[in-house]
Amino acid sequence: MAEIWSKIWQILLAIVFFGIIIFVHELGHFVFAKLFKVKVNEFALGMGPRLFGFTKGDTKYSLRLFPIGGYCAMEGENEDSEDSGAFCNKKVWQRIIIVAAGATMNILLGFIIFGILNSSADLVGTTKIARFDDNAVSATCDLKEGDRIIKIDGTRIFTATDMAYCLTRGDDQYVDMTIERDGKKIELVEVEFPQEEYEGRTILIRDFWLLGEEPNFFNRLSYTLKETIATENMVRLSLLDMITGKYGLKDLSGPIGTMEIISDAAGDISSDDKEERKAAIEYLLFLMAFISINIGMVNVLPIPALDGGRLFFLVIEAIRRKPIPQKYEAYVHAAGMILLLALIAVISLKDIIYLFK
């Protein structure tokens, strides 16, 4: 029985986890819609039948049954309207800000969470090599203690996290690196790293330790910004890898797979061990920051039915100085939504099959 309650608790925590990310996203749209005096018909958390809510002014606030999304429904968002407060009747730059605000808030949430995590860290991370493991392979390739890693295979490195990610992208045990040594940039070709099998793939393992700095306000803030940029970098690279075929459908996770990852990560929060509990909370916060930035980045891609698709049409409108007819834009978004829902359904089915394996 205790095991069942533990699983229920983990699932509820995962729902709250996603709810916060979705709420912050929709809040971005809502705040700027209100700021520009756009009429918001409904602000909802969740989808499906309405559980409860209230109405204040012109806006209905709702909590809906299925915790898989949310929305900020604005007058004239998807159709023409004569209302002076309709979204479609506002200036194009105002509409661009309203649409972009959701993704911006997600990235800001990630930045804030990284800041919270860094505020309690004993040391602030760097990309400078402190020391090598015994018999380190990379030490034989002209890497030295004190070198600061700037790029791996042409990709800018900001933190240990994106350094590890870039090492997983290599096709063999060699990578090209740009380092800084004694104030000079040096290019190193075919730096070798040890390999390891992980989930059916061969990845490279970092065989050196990175230097940590004594924390102060400025380096904590700087590292928080670097972590945010590094996460955006990883999202961009993973999308590129999907387009080029490096990763396939089996490597993607939908809402179900992500919920499972979150609920598993929440398992140690109820632990009696204080250190385990602290580590579990920190890992959950890290996941929230990573997923929130991920959602923010994906949302601004020019994909129909997503915010990025709407931004694409608004930018065209700003260039042409006249809007594309609503009905044509609606057709594109409707087709995009059908394809997006089909993709989510396929990925979710894959996640369910994986769960019952």
Image (cartoon, helix red, strand yellow):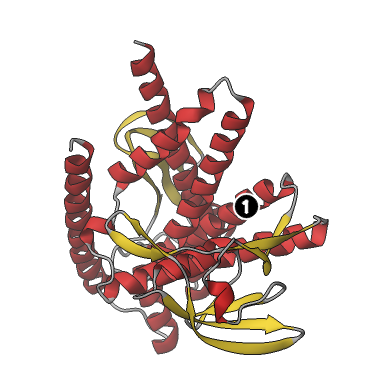
Foreground of the two, 160 or 288: 160
Residue furthest top as drawn: 1
**Which quadrant of the figure contains the C terminus?**
top left
Residue at figure coordinates x 28%, y 66% from the top left:
247
Identify residue for label 1. 114
In the rendered view, does 184 fall on the left or right side of 192? right
As drawn, 216 above or below 147: above
| Residue 200 in view | yes
Nearest the eye: 336 or 239: 239
Residue 341 appears left or right of 197: left
Residue 278, placed above or below residue 202:
above
Q: Position of residue 55 (x, y in %)?
A: 46, 34
Where 286 sits versus 200, above or below? above
Amino acid beneath label 1: Phe
Q: Quadrant of residue 88?
A: bottom left
Identify the residue at image location x=46%, y=32%. 266
Task: Give residue 244's quadrant in the image.
Answer: bottom left
Q: Around disc 1, counting alpha carbons within 10 Å, would you say few (fewer than 14), some (14 to 19), or many (20 or more)?
A: many
Horizontal relation, residue 260 to residue 134: left or right: left
Residue 71 drawn at (x, y percent): 39, 48
Picture coordinates of residue 341, whole percent (x, y): 21, 54
Q: Secondary structure at mark 1?
A: helix
